[in-house]
Image: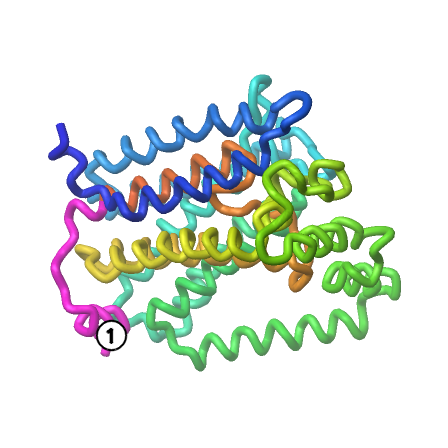
Amino acid sequence: MLNRFRHIDWILLLATFPIVGAGLVSMYAFVGANHYFDRQLFWFPIALLLCLGLSQVDVRALRKSNTILAIFLFFTGLLLLLFIVGSAFKGAQAWFNLGVFAVQPADPMKLGLILILAKYFSRRHVEIAKIKHILISGFYALVPFILVLIQPDFGSAIILFAIWLGMTMVSGISKKHLFIVFTLGVVAFMVLWTLALHPYQKQRIKTFLNPLTDIRGSGYNAYQSTVAVGSGKVLGKGVGYGTQSRLKFLPEHQTDFIFASFAEEWGFVGVTLLLLCFGVVIWRILLIASTGATNFETLYAMGLAIFLMTQFSINVGMNIGLLPVTGQTLPFMSYGGSHLLTEYAGLGILMGMRRFARVSHPESMKNEFLGI
């Protein structure tokens, strides 16, 4: 029985447990109902079983183009279906309401994009420097990006874009061609800003980029979050004694602003330990990337690391007032079954790939990966 799980990276898997635990402690209400805590406690073992189950699947089937395309089209179809039968929540039609729980298709779509980009770039390894591969891979990312953006779910759209950008950069595509594409994008935005946008639209963008300029309006959440983080100081106020979250000054303290809630109660020391655990997760993923059986496995692992690092950085950035509030969850920690299942599913696929890992010197892997 144990031999069936010998390929599991237990250091990676166990490093996620303190992060999940920190989220559960932050959600727990010492007075009143524990709706969020109970639901998350229900989803965690399911996500863990999904991870272990996927680790037993022969993931070499994912190397087949038809399989990857079917997965990508399935999740794209779910995003389209949202506009017909989806439920709106806080202005975004991003959920399927199934009664007992709700599902957000944008989360598994992130894995779908990682898989199809890993497949595309791995097949074009030799000729990857051609500019057409930026455009074709960009089209794969553009379809879900637009579908998510018009929900509107700007945070998930940013993650999808970051996955494409990160995987494009590590795949060996010409940086000159990438620079040309981005220059054209900047020029287009400048023309739009100068000739097309009205003053009130410009003000909305400015407020979004710097919400603390309007702390009584759109910047209220960001302001309360920075207050919570700062008030934690070195050792924190103690579990259950965070005034910003427990007294409801900080909205969404179980989801978007759970990092601020945790920092208020655990302080700098607790945040340092949290960052250490997340650092171990990324380190182990990158270590698995260095021993991928093929470029597909390596690119998938890199894409998964980019996905988690981007989402983590955006959430922490908006919690400490450095980035706009985009409504992104903190990986493994925030309340929500959709993102938790997606993250552990991503790790499960990675563990399955580890069954066929090769022994390779890091420097030789780097040279092969970058086509040197």
- Indicate the amino acid at tag 1: Gly
Q: Which residues are magenta?
A: 353-372
Q: Is residue 156 magenta?
A: no
Query: In this orientation, does residue 104 appear?
Result: yes
User: Residue 305: horizontal and vertical position, in percent?
Assistant: 39, 56
When asked about the image quadrant of residue 151, the answer is: top right
User: Residue 117: horizontal and vertical position, in percent?
Assistant: 37, 56
The residue singled out by tag 1 in the image is 371
Query: In this orientation, does residue 117 appear?
Result: no
The residue sitting at 59% across, 34% down in the picture is: 27
Is 1 or 297 nearer to us in this picture? 1
The residue sitting at 31% across, 40% down in the picture is: 348
Q: Is residue 33 left or right of residue 168?
A: right
Q: How many marks?
A: 1
Q: Is residue 369 magenta?
A: yes
* Up/down of 227 relative to 347, above or below: below
Q: Is residue 354 left or right of residue 318?
A: left
User: Residue 18: horizontal and vertical position, in percent?
Assistant: 42, 42
Q: Is the residue marked by circle 1 packed among few (<14), some (14-19), or many (20+) residues within 10 Å?
A: some
Is 315 or 307 nearer to us in this picture? 315
The residue sitting at 47% across, 61% down in the picture is: 138
Q: Residue furthest bottom?
A: 176
When asked about the image quadrant of residue 5, the answer is: top left
Is 144 or 326 nearer to us in this picture? 326
User: Residue 185: horizontal and vertical position, in percent?
Assistant: 61, 72
The residue sitting at 26% across, 67% down in the picture is: 125
Q: Quadrant of the N terminus?
A: top left
Secondary structure found at label 1: loop
Q: Is residue 192 left or right of residue 68?
A: right
Q: Residue furthest top?
A: 99
* Up/down of 53 relative to 59, above or below: above
Q: Quadrant of the C terminus?
A: bottom left
